[in-house]
Amino acid sequence: MRMKILQSPSWQFAPRRWAAPADEQRRLDDKEHNLEQLRSEHPLVSRAVEVMQMGSWIAASQAQGSPWTEASAGFSGLTSVASAAWGINKLANGQSTLDRVEGLGHLALSAAYGADAVGLMRPGQAWVQQVSNPTSAVAAGCEILLGGADLVRGLREDNQARVWTGAAGILSGAALATSLVAPGATGFAQAVAIMSMAARQSVLGAR
């Protein structure tokens, strides 16, 4: 009898691992089981926070004039809180190094979006970029590492869903890093990040 992976609708998640545990090896050819496992590592709340982060990134870069600036600042503040909550959850309940890397990445984005919210409401403060850029760089590095781990594991296990999810994560992290190194390419970087996020959300589905 095959064990069914139960996915929590809220804060619970399956630990992210570099490879499938020994008791999972015999089921690596089961595509539905592989997809359920992947979804349990990326529950809906995690994907919702990811969508908020993407929306805040774009809104903050496009906000010009009232009331859009205030709305974007509020959205960035809300995203900061959501990112912090999920990051703390991953650090507190994570069972693997990858869980802690993900938690660190979300906390870094929380700091970045918090700084962005302040910067939108009170422009011209130099410390905003001094906080936002380094923390965004940390988040980009974490995303690339997590994506790389999923990509390598997916290739080893011939798990196409994990391969695509990992590749999308690498692209998202690389896009964020590109926008930091070359601010003039931010629009292109955001387009790449949106496509990669859409690809990952499509692979994981609505559950």
Image: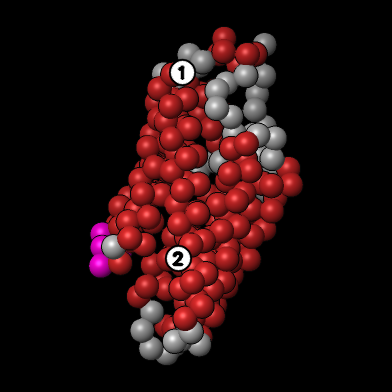
Secondary structure under the numbered disc 1 in the rendered image: helix
Residue 67, above or below 203: below
What's the coloring here?
A: secondary structure
Which residues make up the magenta segment? 184-188
29 displayed left or right of 89: left
Instruction: Give the main secondary structure of the magenta stretch.
Output: helix
Report if residue 185 lies within the magenta region. yes
Residue 145, above or below 4: below
Q: Position of residue 202 (x, y in %)?
A: 41, 42
**Residue type, mark 1 in image:** Glu
Quadrant of the frame with the C terminus: top right
Residue 33, above or below 203: above
At a point 30% along the width and 67% down the height, the residue shown is: 183
Q: Position of residue 44 (x, y in %)?
A: 57, 47
Question: Foreground: 131 or 92?
Answer: 131
Residue 81, above or below 39: below
The answer to whether residue 106 of the structure is visible from this angle is: yes
Disc 1 packing (10 Å; few <14; some 14–19; many ≥20): some
Return the mark for residue 133.
2
At a point 63% along the width and 13% down the height, the residue shown is: 22
Q: Which residue is mark 1?
A: 157
Question: Foreground: 160 or 20?
Answer: 20
Report if residue 203 lies within the magenta region. no
Return the mark for residue 76.
none
The answer to whether residue 52 of the structure is visible from this angle is: no
Secondary structure under the numbered disc 2 in the rendered image: helix
